[in-house]
Image (cartoon, rainbow, N blue to C red):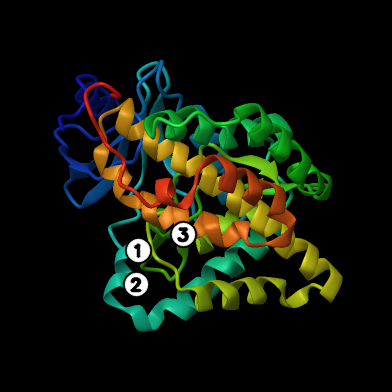
Amino acid sequence: MTAPTAAAEFLTQNGWQNARITPVAGDASFRRYFRVRSDDRQAILMDAPPPHEDPRPFIAIAEYLTGAGFAAPEIFARDLDQGLVLLEDFGDQRMREYLDDHPEAEDGIYRRVIDLLRELHKAPAASVPPYDEAQYLREANLLTEWYCPAQQLEVDAQGFEAIWQQILAPVLAAQNPPVTVMRDYHAENIMLLEDGRLGLLDFQDALIGHPAYDLVSMLQDARRDVPDVLEEDMLAYYLSDHDRDAAEQFRSHYAILGAQRNSKIIGIFTRLCMRDGKERYLDFLPRMWRLLEKDLRHPALAPVAQWFDRNIPDAVRNRPMQVTKANK
């Protein structure tokens, strides 16, 4: 992975002339990241090339988060026409890898990420669009638009959307007042900083919505197995200041948003394979089906569970996807 052609001039203009540029791991988008070193300084160069990417939402949410007292990367320089952003380097100590090496720290670190969410949910919400019904439906429908055709299934897509409209109604009603939802709050987007804070990444798609969304994103992590016992302990920890009725309602919404999110991710990971040739994302599908099926056992999701039983039987969910040139 080579740096964009405009990178050297951009860095020179911002006082980082002759800096060494090396690639770092990216994500599932068109964005790319590079570590920039000059003398005893280092930073991260984000390459978010238009028209595929727009770095302005990232910058806006980073400034919102830092203004609210959270650790988001400081923005050192920007060139919006080129899609280049120079930002604070949070290092390499991700929550994901740290817990792989230090499983005994799991409970304590998950409590810290839950505490961060509690504080975020107390803060004034960001000035971003709402997580409305149309957005939830677009995301859930990714399953019928991508996964089902890839598995050569003819399903009742209209019925799927209609059921979700019904199921999501109480969630939407509970989003008042809304909280900031980062939408990709999971172990690969949390950095363990040297000063003891939790560094936040990958929040450019933030919306305002239900407090259960980021909680389920963390505790039903698409890329890391979270033990069921730990998930329950952390959910109970988050709900420790809720009364019984409020906690029961929240758990219902948590399961609904878990099923919605996991349906979406199954669709997205299938799309990344079929459209973009990123076949490694299929390795995550067994975990996603396990999480989705767990959510579907909640009574609030009975109509959705029945749709899955009629349209995507167990034998299909458990079979490897056949990746061929024809369906690519």
Residue sitting at x 46%, y 53%: 289
Q: Residue 290, which numbered label?
A: 3
**Dot 2 lies on which element?**
helix
Q: Is residue 293 left or right of residue 100?
A: right
Q: Residue 99, which numbered label?
A: 2
Mark 3 vs 2: CB contact within 8 A: no
Q: Is residue 242 above or below residue 303?
A: below
Q: Is residue 214 above or below residue 136?
A: below
Tag 1: residue type? Arg
Residue 198 horizontal/vertical position (percent): 46, 63
Mark 3 vs 1: CB contact within 8 A: no
Q: CA distance from mark 3 to mark 2?
A: 22 Å
Q: CA distance from mark 3 to mark 1?
A: 20 Å
Residue 180 horizontal/vertical position (percent): 66, 47
**Dot 3 lies on which element?**
helix
Q: Is residue 52 left or right of residue 11?
A: right
Mark 1 highlights which residue?
A: 96
Mark 1 vs 2: CB contact within 8 A: yes
Q: CA distance from mark 1 to mark 2?
A: 6 Å
Residue 253, image quadrant: bottom right
| N-term-proximal mark, 3 vs 1 | 1
Of the two numbered discs 3 and 1 in the rendering, the one whose residue sits closer to the viewer: 3
Tag 3: residue type? Arg
Residue sitting at x 66%, y 27%: 158
Of the two numbered discs 3 and 2 in the rendering, the one whose residue sits closer to the viewer: 3
The reply to whether residue 80 is in sight is yes
